[in-house]
């Protein structure tokens, strides 16, 4: 360097950074003079305060070219929108009164590095605005500015996120605020990196959420994604994937298109998408150039209608991607920011004259492109093959012009910056003076943080502009459907829905790929039935599954798992939960209860009738001869057995179960203990009579009652031990392993119930043996025969009961009914065989209820028996009769009729 510059503070660092950067880019010549870079054209408005502008006037160049063809929608229209807005502000006396707003607008050629190079011009203006006294030359003299340029106080742009990121990194060093009208990358919301960046459009995270809601609304669970290389495409797809994963949306393929893509690369993407036939929906976060390339590749593969494209605003409602690819794009759903057509801008733009529009150096090139002509004596790239010359008199018709959707956002960005400047200047310069220090040197940090971020206004075209803490605008989108208009037979975009934190869609307006109204499917596996769950493979792909049925007793805990409802519960019809199964027990209105209850009731009435008859004839020979004490005990046992039916058919509870377990065995014990005591007494009496005249022991009524009570108490002890070892209560029983039926039963096993009756079985067996043993007793003492009949029948009943009871374990109603009937039959057999003959005589043949008939018959039989066994019949007859009479005498039986009535029959 030939000059030495002394700078103090932060500006020295920035100056050296600027000198280094411009040297590298060739802006400084070898003498240190600042030169404009090659291609220095800019759209300019001279003003007191100047705004910078960055627009993709040209497409990105191919091969080694910096710039490509003119971008007539995103470039020229947006640029003219900024110029139009500045004109409107300058005509408005309420905004920046007395101050003219100017502009210096550069072409970015849709490239970040190219935009960064152009942005250095704003930095040049920044340094030219510095106080010259801060710089000292080598000879000690004060430096003088060689060039005076109005510094920019803020920059409008860029369009692509990659451009805005590069520019934001530079502008933040010099505290120059930047407002983008189209950059939607979520990374730009990071204020630690992009402190001076704000935008009038929402970040891509809102757009990604809108796209996820759209996919989720149509139950598309398996999709592919294609993204452009760069911040816009990559970050957009990342946000989409994050939101989609939360809603169980899976990805068959995640593809990326490079910045310098070729036809072969686009063909490869289409081939990759075609590999998975289950996937119809493809999510696109593409720049417009890449969207067009992909549709062209689909056309080349003749795959029109194969895919449903869901595209972000990079495609939006532009004609560029779909022109010539209408059939491949048909049915696509695209996302576009909600915006309003500014009618005044249409009027302004339609009146632009290429001969008079000197402030826009690219407008003549736009005129060439839109009218397919070339200007004479002007060499413009990409026009060599054109034959027609432009005259400037061509008509800009509606067929060649349609307002671009971001025009309103450009308008809002310029207006927001102007309003912030207006408020700051009003605060800092109460008296409007162009020499006001605050106006001469705008404080960018103050402008941004105190005014711009706090700006909120209605733009007059239906939009409210406001910024959140990250400098982002709120997300509001239109859902567009690209389809064929059946009336005009022309393809176009039709609004079918909106999104503003939630989705609203008009399904009837959508035409799907293939010009059908049937919603396409995009899933790896078909939905499972309500009773099936999704079995996911080892790879954990939640969108590809095999439907497997739940067990009949399971409910769907979630779509990937069934869970047992638990004992006593059953899944609902929709398998979303469980309910408590009704507990089954004996119902009084069923035949299973009515029949045994009727039998039991009849038995109770009969038993009570017998007891009453016996009580009324308590002193008659028949009653006395039957052993009335044991008879009454036996009748009580029968009554207990009949009453047990009512307990057995009652709903189980702890108390009911105690009574059941105690009552059945106790009732049987009373019956068979009485019978055993009676048969044992008869046996001992007649055996003793044949051998000796000595009276047998323990044959008195009191002794008989004591013996029977001891036998009964043994059953009571067994039952108490059983209740201790197996505490009473209720349980739920599932017959035959079935889970859909719940039976409420007493908490005891069937085997243990049978075991508790073993003692009664022993009594029955012993009674039967005694019955057999005493079967030849004299006719008048033949109650033993009836006891025999009772025991034989009882054995048959019990032998039939056991297999039936255990064979009906799965039918609790049959089982309980069988038990009730068996208990009642056992009591009925005892009642009928033992008491029916006596009752018959007492009621219908009372003349036979006398001592004479009984005694005579007895003595004759015994005498005949003795004579038949003696060598001297006369002597033996005499001897046996004497012994027999002595025997009965020993047990208080006399030959008088009165004593016989009282004691002889009682002895039996």
Image (cartoon, helix red, strand yellow):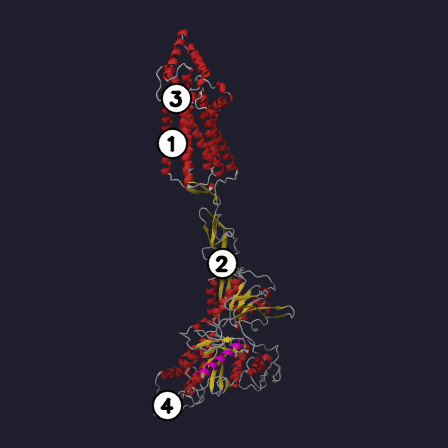
Rendered-image quadrant of the C terminus:
top left
- Main SS of the magenta part reads helix
**Dot 1: element:** helix
User: In this view of the protein, can residue 741 be seen by the observer?
Assistant: yes
Closest to the camera, between mark 3 and mark 4, is 3
Task: Name the residue that disc number 1 marks.
Answer: 715
**Residue 585 percent coordinates (x, y):** 48, 41
Between the residue at mark 1 and the residue at mark 2, the CA separation in whole angstroms equals 68 Å
Disc 4 residue crowd, few under 14, some 14–19, many 20+, Cα 10 Å: few
**Dot 3: element:** helix
**Residue 609 percent coordinates (x, y):** 48, 28
In front: 786, or 534?
Answer: 786
Task: Name the residue that disc number 3 marks.
Answer: 681
Disc 3 residue crowd, few under 14, some 14–19, many 20+, Cα 10 Å: many
Closest to the camera, between mark 2 and mark 3, is 3
**21 in relation to 898, above or below:** below
Closest to the camera, between mark 1 and mark 3, is 3
Which portion, as a residue range, is magenta?
Answer: 405-424
Disc 1 residue crowd, few under 14, some 14–19, many 20+, Cα 10 Å: many
Task: Name the residue that disc number 2 marks.
Answer: 543
The mark that comes first in sequence, 1 or 3, is 3
Between the residue at mark 4 and the residue at mark 2, the CA separation in whole angstroms equals 70 Å
């Amino acid at each position: 360097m030939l000059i030495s510059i002394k700078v103090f503070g932060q500006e020295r660092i920035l100056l050296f950074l600027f000198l280094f950067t411009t040297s590298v880019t060739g802006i400084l010549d070898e003498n240190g003079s600042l030169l404009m870079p090659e291609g220095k054209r800019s759209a300019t408005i001279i003003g007191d305060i100047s705004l910078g502008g960055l627009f993709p006037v040209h497409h990105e160049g191919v091969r080694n070219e910096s710039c490509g063809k003119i971008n007539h929608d995103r470039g020229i229209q947006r640029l003219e929108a900024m110029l139009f807005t500045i004109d409107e502000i300058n005509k408005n006396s309420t905004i920046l009164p007395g101050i003219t707003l100017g502009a210096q607008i550069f072409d970015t050629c849709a490239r970040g590095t190219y935009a960064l190079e152009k942005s250095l011009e704003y930095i040049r203006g920044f340094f030219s605005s510095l106080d010259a006294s801060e710089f000292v030359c080598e000879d000690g003299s004060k430096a003088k500015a060689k060039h005076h340029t109005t510094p920019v106080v803020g920059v409008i742009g860029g369009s692509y996120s990659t451009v805005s990121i590069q520019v934001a990194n530079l502008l933040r060093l010099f505290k120059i605020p930047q407002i983008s009208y189209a950059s939607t990358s979520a990374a730009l919301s990071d204020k630690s990196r992009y402190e001076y960046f704000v935008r009038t459009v929402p970040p891509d995270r809102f757009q990604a959420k809108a796209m996820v809601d759209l996919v989720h609304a149509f139950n598309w669970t398996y999709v592919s994604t294609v993204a452009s290389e760069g911040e816009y495409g990559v970050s957009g797809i990342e946000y989409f994937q994050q939101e989609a994963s939360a809603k169980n949306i899976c990805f068959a393929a995640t593809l990326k298109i490079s910045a310098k893509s070729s036809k072969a690369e686009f063909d490869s993407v289409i081939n990759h998408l075609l590999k998975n036939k289950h996937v119809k929906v493809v999510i696109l976060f593409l720049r417009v150039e890449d969207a067009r390339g992909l549709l062209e590749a689909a056309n080349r593969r003749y795959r029109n209608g194969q895919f449903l494209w869901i595209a972000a605003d990079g495609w939006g409602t532009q004609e560029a991607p779909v022109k010539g690819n209408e059939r491949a794009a048909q049915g696509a759903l695209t996302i576009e920011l909600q915006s309003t057509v500014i009618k005044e801008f249409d009027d302004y733009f339609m009146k632009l004259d290429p001969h008079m529009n000197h402030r826009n150096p690219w407008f003549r090139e736009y005129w060439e492109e839109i009218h397919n002509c070339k200007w004479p004596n002007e060499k413009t790239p990409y026009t060599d093959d054109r034959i027609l010359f432009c005259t400037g008199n061509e008509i800009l018709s509606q067929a060649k012009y349609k307002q671009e959707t971001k025009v309103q956002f450009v308008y809002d960005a310029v207006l927001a910056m102007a309003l912030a400047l207006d408020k700051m200047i009003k605060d800092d310069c109460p008296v409007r003076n162009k020499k006001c220090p605050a106006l001469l040197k705008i404080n960018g940090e103050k402008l941004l943080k105190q005014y711009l971020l706090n700006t909120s206004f209605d733009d007059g075209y239906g939009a409210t502009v406001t910024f959140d803490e990250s400098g982002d605008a709120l997300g509001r989108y239109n859902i567009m459907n690209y389809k064929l208009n059946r009336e005009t037979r022309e393809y176009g975009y039709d609004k079918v829905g909106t999104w503003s934190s939630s989705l609203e869609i008009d399904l009837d307006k959508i035409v799907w790929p293939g010009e059908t109204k049937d919603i396409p499917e995009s899933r790896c596996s078909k939905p499972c039935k309500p009773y099936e769950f999704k079995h996911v493979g080892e790879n954990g792909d939640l969108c590809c599954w095999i439907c497997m049925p739940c067990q009949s007793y399971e409910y769907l805990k979630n779509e990937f798992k069934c869970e047992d409802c638990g004992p006593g519960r059953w899944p609902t019809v929709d398998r979303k939960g469980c309910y408590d199964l009704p507990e089954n027990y004996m119902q009084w209105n069923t035949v299973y209860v009515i029949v045994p209850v009727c039998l039991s009731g009849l038995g109770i009435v009969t038993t009570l009738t017998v007891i009453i008859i016996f009580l009324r004839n308590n002193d008659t020979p028949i009653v006395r001869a039957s052993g009335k004490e044991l008879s009454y005990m036996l009748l009580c046992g029968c009554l207990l057995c009949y009453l047990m039916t009512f307990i057995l058919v009652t709903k189980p509870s702890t108390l009911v179960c105690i009574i059941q377990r105690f009552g059945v065995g106790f009732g049987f014990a009373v019956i068979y203990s009485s019978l055993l005591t009676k048969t044992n007494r008869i046996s001992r009496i007649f055996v003793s009579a044949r051998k000796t005249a000595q009276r047998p022991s323990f044959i008195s009524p009191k002794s008989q009652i004591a013996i029977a009570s001891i036998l009964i108490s043994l059953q009571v002890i067994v039952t108490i031990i059983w209740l201790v070892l197996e505490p009473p209560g209720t349980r739920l029983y599932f017959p035959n392993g079935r889970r859909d039926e719940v039976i409420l039963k007493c908490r005891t096993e069937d085997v243990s119930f049978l075991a508790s009756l073993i003692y009664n079985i022993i009594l029955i067996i012993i009674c039967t043996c005694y019955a057999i043993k005493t079967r030849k007793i004299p006719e008048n003492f033949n109650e033993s025969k009836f006891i025999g009949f009772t025991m034989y029948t009882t054995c048959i009943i019990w032998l039939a009961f056991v297999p039936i009871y255990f064979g009906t374990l799965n039918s609790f109603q049959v089982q309980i009914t069988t038990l009730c009937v068996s208990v009642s039959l056992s009591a009925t057999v005892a009642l009928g065989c033992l008491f029916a003959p006596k009752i018959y005589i007492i009621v219908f043949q009372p003349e036979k209820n006398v001592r004479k008939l009984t005694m005579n018959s007895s003595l004759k039989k015994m005498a005949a028996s003795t004579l038949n066994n003696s060598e001297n019949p006369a002597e033996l007859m005499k001897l046996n009769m004497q012994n027999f009479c002595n025997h009965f005498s020993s047990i208080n039986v006399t030959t008088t009729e009165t004593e016989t009535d009282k004691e002889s029959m009682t002895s039996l």
